[in-house]
Image: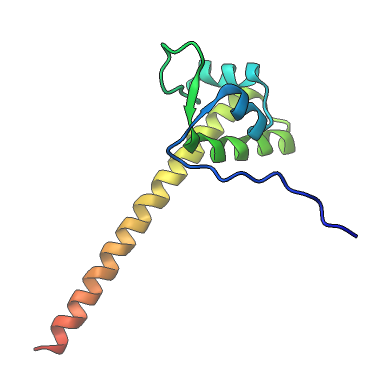
Amino acid sequence: MKPPLLDVAWLDASADVTVSELSRVCAMSAAELDELVDYGALVPLDRAQPERLFSAECVMPLRTASRLRRDFDLDLFTVAMLLDYLHQIVALERQLRSLQAQLTAQAVTKAASCRYE
């Protein structure tokens, strides 16, 4: 039995994605993405451009929110709130890693200074 083929793409977080690309990778229609923009949960890079572009950083949280929407039959307003919470979680995890690195550095410095006393 052959394993199923996967659609894999390497995504640079600093890249820009169009509405059609975002729609394809997140399994949401352009109208649904527009509604998320209206709610403020999805922010285009430059609203003055004729074709909306988004940061590729929004792809993973949007895919997660899209999957949760399908699994739990959520409406788009709830998805917008969910995206906000996902962004907050990512920011808090980043902050936690930074604080843990600072504590580790302090512990190493303290241990090194104790050896030389």
Total marks shown come to 0
Instruction: Give the percent coordinates (x, y) of residue 3.
Output: 82, 56
Residue 109 relative to residue 35: left or right: left
Furthest residue in direction right, as rendered: 1
* Quadrant of the drawing holding the C terminus: bottom left
Residue 68 relative to residue 18: left or right: right
Residue 54 relative to residue 96: left or right: right
Instruction: Give the percent coordinates (x, y) of residue 15.
Output: 46, 35
Figure colour scheme: rainbow
Does residue 85 sit above or below 6 in this rendering? Answer: above
The residue shown at (25%, 69%) is 105
User: Which sits in the foreground, 37 or 5?
Assistant: 5
Instruction: Give the percent coordinates (x, y) of residue 59.
Output: 55, 36
The residue shown at (47%, 38%) is 57
The residue shown at (56%, 46%) is 10
Give the quarter of the image for residue 104: bottom left
Does residue 108 sit above or below 35 in this rendering? Answer: below
The residue shown at (67%, 30%) is 24
Instruction: Give the percent coordinates (x, y) of residue 65.
Output: 61, 36
* Quadrant of the drawing holding the N terminus: bottom right
User: Which sits in the foreground, 11 or 67?
Assistant: 11
